[in-house]
Image (tube, rainbow, N blue to C red):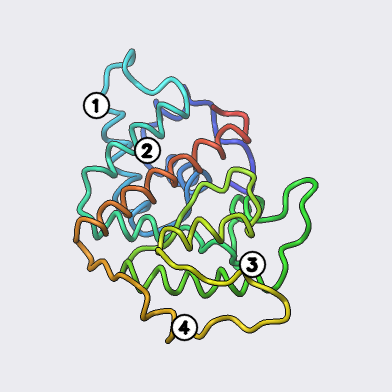
Amino acid sequence: MNGLPPPRIDILVHSPSPSVYRPVLEQLLEPSPPLSTLLTPQLHERISSLPGSSKPKSYSDLLALAAQIVDEWDVEDQAAFLAAHPRIGETKNLSKASEGEQAPQAGQQATPAQVLKRLQVLNSLYEDAFPGLRFITFVNGRSRAEIVPELESLLSLSLPPPTASEAEPRLSDVRKQLRISPAGSKPWRDELKRGLRDMWLIAKSRAEKMGVK
């Protein structure tokens, strides 16, 4: 949608074609095969089946209905949907929305190189600990440096703070501390659910920034 605001909700929900939904969902979420092949047609079908008085009246309603649909998917599709979001700390090949969310906010300094390196290491460890998942968090104005302790705590790791003068701990050494949660296990499913919850918070925040709550 080239950064343009999404169409008015009353126009969108009366669209006869699911193709209108796809760019809107990609702008609020992130492009992915599950979004294209599952969510877009399923959301359109669900909304088309509703009486006029029950159709979404806001983008918040639309996202709530989309979340209900995703909750009905199998966990493999949910994980692929979640993994469409970029890793925290990535700086290349970001969507316009993700680029704005990961960029330093007003009054914040540029992210130090050692913090980006620490996040790269932690993302790799997270994906070892939760195979098939990607760490997603609602940044909500926080700096990348503020995300580091959240991710370390989630992984139950105790690492020295990143500094410019010291090398990062070797991945092979830190992996020995990891508790691995196999795909489909309860901890894995709980983490998938947490990530999806934060993903919808991100989507709602994007809608608000676009002026379409």
The disc placed on residue 171 is 4
Which residue is under mark 2?
Answer: 17
Which residue is under mark 3?
Answer: 91
Distance from the alpha carbon under mark 2 to that under mark 1: 13 Å
Counting residues from the start of the chain, the first of labels 3 and 4 encountered is 3
Residue 185 position, x and y percent, is 19, 61
Quarter holding residue 84: bottom left
| In front: label 4 or label 1 | 4
Q: Amino acid at mark 1?
A: Ser
Quarter holding residue 102: bottom right
Which residue is under mark 1?
Answer: 49
Label 2 CA crowd tier, 10 Å (few <14, some 14–19, many 20+): few
Q: Amino acid at mark 2?
A: Ser
Counting residues from the start of the chain, the first of labels 1 and 3 encountered is 1
Q: Is residue 143 left or right of residue 174?
A: right
Q: Amino acid at mark 3?
A: Thr
| In front: label 3 or label 4 | 4
Label 4 CA crowd tier, 10 Å (few <14, some 14–19, many 20+): few
Q: Using the image, determine if residue 81 lies above or below residue 28.
A: below
